[in-house]
Image: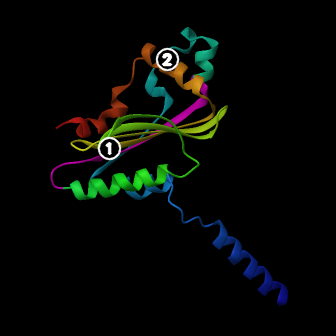
């Protein structure tokens, strides 16, 4: 009987410890992907529609390190500016977590963008691009992969130039860009 009580207590404590209540981008995506002012989509590597036989070894390595991309966008308008500010501040607070290391920042004030990453310099697990503009809204893009590094991302950009992007996967974002 004592063993059962002890085991049950131990399992309960482990459950409490494992439940992380800290905000994370993944939780933020899950919580908001179905809300009316948000647009969510997952983009697979096949969106690039590129002939892998015409890529260099370095380009293939970069492409293979990329698993998928998650996009969550908030469409701002004159009726939801208070919600826009609140949601934008939530994302900014999440990105202040030390696990998100900022690579670069563009713009200033109310409009701008930042690029951050999770992992070490030679084993990046996630790149995060956060862009916002008061008139349009904001978008958070999570580029997920294994063993990515800054060179892979730069190489991936060169692959993008050679690709024939499948715009069908990006259709949901059209409404965000429309004014």
On screen, residue 147 versus residue 55, left or right, reads: right
Instruction: Looking at the picture, tell me which residue is in the foreground, 60 or 127.
Output: 127
Q: Is residue 67 positioned above or below 5 on the image?
A: above
Instruction: Please state the extent of the stretch shown in magenta in the rendering.
Output: 63-79
User: Relative to residue 12, is residue 67 drawn left or right?
Assistant: left
Residue at 42% in and 59% down: 31
Magenta-colored stretch includes residue 31:
no
Would you call the spot at circle 1 few (<14 residues within 10 Å), some (14-19), or many (20 or more)? many
Residue in the picture at 59% in, 22% down: 151
Vertical placement of residue 125 versus 45, above or below? below
Q: Which marked residue is nearer to the observer: mark 2 or mark 1? A: 1
- Image quarter of residue 42: top left
In the foreground, 16 or 118? 118
Give x and y (percent) for residue 95: 48, 49
Q: Is residue 73 magenta?
A: yes
Indicate the quadrant where residue 80 lies: bottom left
Which of the pair 87/60 is nearer the observer?
87
Residue 109 visible to an observer of this rendering: yes
Label 2: how many Cα within 10 Å (few below 14, some 14–19, many 20+): many
In the picture, which quadrant includes the N terminus?
bottom right
Identify the disc placed on residue 159.
Answer: 2
Picture residue at 65% right of the left edge, 66% below the top:
18
């Amino acid at each position: 009987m004592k063993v059962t009580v002890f085991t049950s207590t131990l399992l309960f404590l482990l459950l409490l410890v494992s439940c992380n209540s800290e905000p994370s981008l993944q939780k933020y995506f899950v919580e908001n992907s179905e809300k009316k002012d948000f647009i969510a989509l997952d983009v697979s590597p096949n969106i690039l529609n590129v002939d892998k036989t015409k890529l260099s070894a370095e380009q293939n390595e970069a492409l293979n390190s990329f698993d998928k991309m998650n996009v969550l966008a908030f469409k701002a308008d004159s009726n939801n500016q208070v919600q826009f500010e609140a949601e934008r501040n939530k994302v900014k607070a999440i990105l202040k977590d030390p696990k998100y290391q900022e690579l670069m920042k563009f713009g200033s004030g109310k409009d701008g963008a930042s690029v951050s990453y999770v992992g070490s310099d030679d084993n990046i697990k996630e790149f995060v691009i956060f862009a916002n503009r008061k008139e349009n809204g904001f978008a958070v893009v999570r580029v997920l992969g294994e063993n990515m590094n800054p060179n892979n991302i730069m190489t991936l950009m060169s692959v993008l130039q050679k690709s024939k992007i499948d715009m069908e996967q990006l259709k949901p974002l059209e409404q965000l860009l429309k004014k």
